[in-house]
Amino acid sequence: MKPKQHVSKGIPQAKQWEISKNIHQSFIADISKFQAFDPELNMAYSDKISQQIQLIEKIQPNYAVVARQMQATKNVINFSDKAIANIRSIRYYVKKAFPDDDFHLLEFGYPSLKKVVNSQHKLIFFLKLFILTLEKYKDDLMLKGLALEMIDETCQLGTELENANIAKEQAKRARLIATGMRVKAYDDLWKLISNVAKAGKIIFEGQPEYYRNYILNNAPKKKTLKVADEEINSAFMQGKVTAADTHKAVEDAIVEILTTPLSAITDEKGEFYIDEVVPGTYSIKITAVGYKELIKTDIKLISDNEDQEFNFELEKLLLEIT
């Protein structure tokens, strides 16, 4: 499993960026020689490259859209947990207000609560109906001791959960759009730079001090980190999150490397990828709507571990309704 990163001829975007800017600077310095060789390789052509570089700079960086998606997903998980806790507490007052009456438990939806807690969309719909019923019997429940604050909080959670879910879906869409824009922008930049490099190698053949400025190097450098004034090769954390009972992918699960700011969110295949990790032994926390939180300890990450994968299974959240 490798990071989902578009490449041109095997070159990651970060490397394309570095190569493109370096070749562009050399091109500007040698512009007269290029124009003599091919009149189309002039300042106007250089301006096209500059505009393409500026276009890429304006596209939201991946870490920014991922951070938005991550925060929205955390909100969905938090609001879901709080809403479920409130729903379970309110059941006590429903039974107290309507003893020996299963009809009201059915009207509040309690028999189906176990079935919806593992589905984000089903839970949101359940909560909407629950709140309507809660408002209907508000006075009866308050007479039996249910606090108005809990009623108001539950209603507010319904709104917050729905808004957080919308924000999460918007962030996912924004991430896809930004990725598509970034891919096209880099492709267009690479075409412009490739033309310069091709001409440069002809113009400066036999002049190694200039020739080397126009080589499209497709051997990306290994990522390094500075630790205690020493440069070390970074480690990676990649793998897949699935449901323990069905082995199906868990989408939108949050994978966190504890004691670090590093985290990732799983895609539709349940896959995740984190790079630039300082080699070491860590505890990993995985959370997702409708699943029990999972913490795995003693996960050892070593330098240059691109082929190492970690697969995690989440147990579904099972509610005991008493």
Image: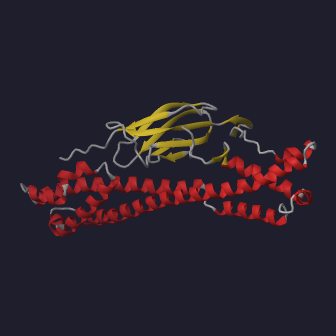
Q: Residue at x 15, y 62 (%)?
A: 144
Side of 134 where 164 appears, left or right: right
Q: Which sits in the foreground, 3 or 137?
A: 3
**How far from the left and from the top, in percent, is residue 95?**
13, 56
**How far from the left and from the top, in percent, is residue 225?**
69, 40
Side of 111 where 258 appears, left or right: right
Residue 277 in the image: above or below residue 213: above
**How far from the left and from the top, in percent, is residue 103?**
10, 58
Which corner quadrant of the image does residue 291 belong to?
top left
Q: Residue at x 29, y 50 (%)?
A: 117
The colour scheme of the drawn protein is secondary structure
Q: Which sits in the foreground, 137 or 312?
A: 312
Residue 257 in the image: above or below residue 41: above
Side of 117 where 76 appears, left or right: right
Q: Residue at x 76, y 42 (%)?
A: 217
Q: Residue at x 14, y 57 (%)?
A: 106
**How far from the left and from the top, in percent, is residue 199?**
84, 52
Residue 92 in the image: above or below residue 273: below
Q: Which sits in the foreground, 89 or 197?
A: 197
Which corner quadrant of the image does residue 294 belong to?
top left
Residue 69 in the image: above or below residue 140: above
Position of the N terminus, as image quadrant, is top right
Residue at the far left in the pictured view:
100
Side of 12 where 267 appears, left or right: left
